[in-house]
Image (spheres, grey):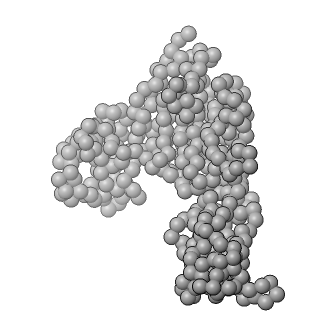
């Protein structure tokens, strides 16, 4: 058995060792395209007749230490608060996945990629004081970082609160407040890895939380005592923001820019079996289904003596499309003789509907009301709940 050293520069600007014995759980597999070996994500499941609970499972791929409860196709992926751990069989080029924080805006924001071939020494020389930065970190050096791309230059404040303007093509400097020669902050690259879902027959790219998503070049297939399955790696950790579309099928997609050290694109073999072939760039084998949108009463309701002024709260399991709340209706009186109106709906909480009566002076006394939250109230991807929610009550005398 022999070992090889693989160097990755990214915020992982570091090294990871791997051995070539294919039978070892500590081994990586650098030959061929980088393959998705497993995907772990959160699913909602029922325990007996109780309410749904959540757990993290292998929704794609297998592991010898996993039980059937740990690994199976996911048909109710948790819509809000999910996190995907996409475990690879080899190292990816970290430069394609994470970028570093610069001292000021370099294009549309203050984050910039690390050029291929750059080392920690290159980061350090571009983290020096502003007055010596042009000499230490010239734009002419292909390994310099945080290069201004704006025609009018890039303006900011140095560590002594003095304004500066960097010409296009020169470095604004790496943000390094603690002066350790390394970037203070990193961020996942927009579009590097994403989640794509089938909404109304059309593919929809899910918004990704770039600050909480990341690439970790550490780990292997050996389940450690600390961290368990959630320490397997190397891995891309992908956080949807703020939620997944409900009741849809989803898959993962990698940009063609995301490659291994040999320039091979990522693919996903059937079932995560790395012995099987897969076409570089094709990760369609990874599939999961998201739980439906759900609505539930979130405030006390007295069927026979409901308060005439208390707000009625309805909570969803995902953020709600505020424009769709206009379809909520209230019927006052018996079905044979009623008045229908649209209530005032407040939108201060993303996943909560607040039905407010005080603007109309409160409800009538001793009157039967039926609130209907129809299926036209949707999540932010315009996906509907499976059924409407009706809340019926009679107001008290006071």
User: Where is residue 174 shown, x and y percent of the image?
Assistant: 30, 45
Name the quadrant containing residue 248. bottom right
The percent position of residue 267, horizontal first and vertical second, equals 65, 36
Q: Residue furthest top?
A: 1
Tell me if 131 is positioned left or right of 346 in this view: left
The residue closer to the viewer here, 279 or 29, is 29
- Residue 262 located left or right of residue 107: right
Q: Where's residue 391, x and y in %?
A: 70, 72
* Outermost residue toward the right in this view: 336
Residue 77 can be seen, yes or no = no
Q: Which residue is drawn at 53% across and 41% down?
A: 237
Q: Which of these two is toward me, 160 or 95? A: 160
The quadrant of the picture occupied by the C terminus is bottom right
Q: Which of the image's four quarters has the N terminus?
A: top right
Specify whether residue 114 is in view.
yes
Q: In which quarter of the image is residue 232?
A: top right
Q: Judge by depth and name the residue closer to the eye, 310 or 63.
A: 310
Q: Quadrant of residue 300?
A: bottom right
- In the displayed image of the protein, which residue is found farthest to the front? 397
Q: In this view, does 88 lie above or below 4?
A: below
Query: What x and y, as percent, mark residue 296?
Result: 66, 63
Residue at left 65%, top 57%? 245
Tell me if 87 is positioned left or right of 336 in this view.
left
């Amino acid at each position: 058995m022999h070992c090889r050293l693989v160097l990755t520069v990214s915020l992982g600007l570091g090294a990871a060792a791997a051995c070539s014995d294919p039978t070892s759980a500590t081994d990586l597999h650098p030959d061929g395209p980088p393959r998705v070996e497993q995907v772990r994500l959160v699913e909602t499941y029922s325990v007996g007749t109780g309410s749904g609970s959540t757990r993290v499972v292998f929704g794609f791929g297998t592991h010898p230490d996993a039980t059937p409860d740990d690994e199976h196709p996911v048909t109710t992926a948790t819509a809000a608060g999910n996190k995907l751990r996409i475990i690879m069989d080899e190292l990816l080029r970290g430069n394609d996945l994470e970028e570093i924080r610069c001292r000021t805006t370099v294009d549309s924001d203050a984050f910039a990629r690390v050029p291929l071939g750059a080392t920690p020494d290159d980061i350090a020389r571009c983290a020096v004081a502003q007055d010596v930065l042009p000499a230490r970190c010239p734009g002419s050096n292909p390994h310099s970082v945080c290069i201004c791309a704006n025609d009018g230059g890039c303006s900011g404040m140095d560590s002594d609160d003095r304004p500066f303007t960097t010409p296009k093509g020169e470095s604004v400097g790496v943000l390094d407040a603690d002066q350790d020669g390394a970037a203070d902050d990193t961020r996942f690259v927009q579009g590097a890895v994403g989640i794509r879902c089938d909404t109304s027959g059309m593919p929809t790219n899910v918004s990704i939380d770039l600050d909480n998503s990341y690439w970790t070049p550490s780990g292997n297939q050996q389940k450690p005592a600390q961290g368990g399955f959630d320490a397997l790696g190397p891995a891309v950790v992908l956080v949807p923001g703020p939620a997944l579309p409900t009741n849809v099928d989803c898959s993962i997609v990698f940009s063609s820019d995301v490659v291994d050290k040999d320039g091979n694109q990522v693919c996903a073999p059937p079932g995560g079996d790395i012995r099987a072939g897969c076409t570089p760039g094709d990760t369609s084998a990874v599939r999961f289904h998201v739980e439906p949108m759900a609505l539930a009463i979130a405030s006390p309701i007295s069927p026979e003596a409901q308060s005439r002024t208390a707000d009625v709260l309805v909570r969803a399991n995902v953020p709600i499309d505020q424009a769709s709340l206009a379809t909520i209706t209230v019927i006052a009186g018996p079905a044979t003789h009623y008045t229908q109106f649209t209530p005032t709906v407040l939108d201060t909480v993303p996943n909560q509907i607040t039905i407010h009566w005080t603007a109309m002076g409160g409800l009538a006394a001793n009157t039967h009301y039926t609130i209907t939250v129809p299926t036209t109230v949707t999540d932010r991807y315009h996906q509907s709940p499976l059924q409407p929610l009706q809340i019926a009550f009679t107001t008290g005398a006071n």
